[in-house]
Amino acid sequence: MSKVLNKKDIISIRDLSEIEIKTILNLAKKFKKKLPKKYLLNKIIAHCFFEPSTRTRLSFETATLRLGGQIIGFSGSKNLSIKKGENLQDTIKTISCYADLIIIRHSLEGSARLAAEVSDKPIINAGDGANQHPTQALSDLFTLQEAQGDLEGLSIAFVGDLKYGRTVHSLVQLCALFNMRLFLVSPSILGLPEIICDELKHKGIRFSFHANLDEVISKIDILYMTRLQQERFTQSEHQLFEKQYILTLDKLKKVKSNLNILHPLPRGLEIDKTIDETPYALYFKQVTNAIYVRQAVLSLLLEK
Amino acid sequence: MSKTRSVSAIENGVVIDHIPAGQSLKIIRLLHVVNSKQRVTLGLNLRSTSLKLKDLIKIENRLLTPQEIDHVAIFAPGATISRIENFKVSIKINCELPKTIRDVLVCPNLNCINHVESKGYFKLESSSNHVKLRCFYCEKQFDRDQVEEICL
């Protein structure tokens, strides 16, 4: 197995080279075809979910168990020493004494980076506030490559909350590697952060802003939907946004035949359930594929 | 008409010149000279051929460490720093923007871990004299004027 990621941390997509990304995806592909060896035998993986998670936590647990690893950890910070005033750095240093690798989900942005600074064991960021969720983005990329083959030059629309959606922030940066054309569809208050737009400009990536999904749906190969969080709007705003950003069967009449619809889940009302049965829907495949990608990441980081 | 100095000469110490107008008070705060016993002379909005208006700071009996020179460079990337001995310039250096700055400024993002623990750590980027700081932790980027110094 490749040693390019051995003992490294996976904190942000920005840190990964093209070779490292390809190595992860190629290994995930192998793992999907053939049950992998028990690469994590006698390894203890700490799953530290300081904030709740269903999919990411269970996906990492499944990946760890399939590779023969053992799990310690927690979900939620209710019963931790943090409640007694212990800071994150001391908590992580302590866990580093028990585990061979630490997976961290935390509500504060930059928490995974800080954890990596103080830990002598590899850290995987499983979501830090609205910042990054690199393994989700890698899983999305894996699913897209599987469905579309070559991604070079394809068109993708990101729809919904592009401001706070950490999976979008990570995936947009990966799309730039394939020179994809980006359509950014969101209410103006939930647009993609300026810093990411600046990076796209700097890399020469073509992108445009849109207020309505109907404007772009016939032009795209990939539709990446995200959850609109009700608490961010007034009721009247939410009703208006729902009409503009909810995907229903009738909106799919003029789409390209190769269209793929992705969503990092959990979903709200933004994808009507009738779409689940169409050949376009890939969001549950994303969940399955995420396990292979996380198996690949875990194996590569702890490769002897 | 004879020319006179806007700010009087010092015998020993350091002169920070060519500071963009309006930035000197931030530099004064960063260098922690306000509560020190050192005599500080400050020139604001002085005429300058390159900047049109500039600020200038003279601090008597004080030298700057390389780290402090980096701090000056964040707010005045084109400044010159002269060491003065017996009223003469003994060494003159041009400020260069450092690649990173640590433990001096705090991240403006209230949801950044920097607000709870750890001190500020930024990567600095500059394009056409416009300095941007990217927080090492939350990865957000800010204009120089958005970022405040850590209160000591």
Image (tube, rainbow, N blue to C red):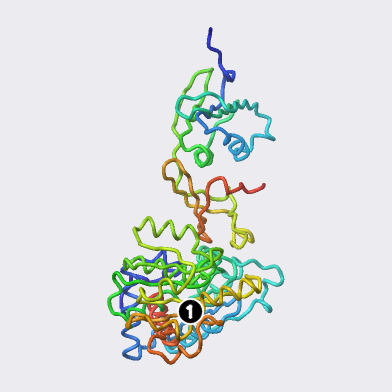
> Which residue is at a point 56% across and 22% down the rendered structure image?
B12
- Is residue A109 shown left or right of residue A223? right
- SS under mark 1: loop
Q: Is residue A143 visible?
A: no
The answer to whether A259 appears left or right of B85 in the picture is left
Image quadrant for the C terminus of chain A?
bottom left
Q: Quadrant of the N terminus of chain A?
A: bottom left
Q: Between residue A80 and residue A127, name the one nearer to us.
A: A127
Q: Which of B112 and A212 is in front in this view?
A: A212
* Residue A196 in picture, x, y percent from top left: 45, 60
How many marks the image carries: the answer is 1
Chain designation of label 1: A
Picture coordinates of residue B142, whole percent (x, y): 53, 52
Depicted A131 relative to depicted B55: above or below: below
Q: Quadrant of residue A206?
A: bottom left
Q: Mark 1 points at which residue?
A: A264
The spot of residue A94 in percent (x, y) is: 58, 72
Quadrant in the rendering for residue A276: bottom left
Tell me which amino acid carries mark 1: Pro
What residue lies at 59% left-to-right and 28% top-to-bottom? B44
**Rendered position, A199 above or below A223:** above
- Residue drawn 36% across and 79% down? A144
Name the residue furthest top. B1
Is residue A204 at least partly visible in the picture? yes
Q: Residues within 10 Å of mark 1 (few under 14, many from 20)?
A: many
Q: In which quarter of the image is residue A287?
A: bottom left
Closest to the observer, B129 or B81? B129
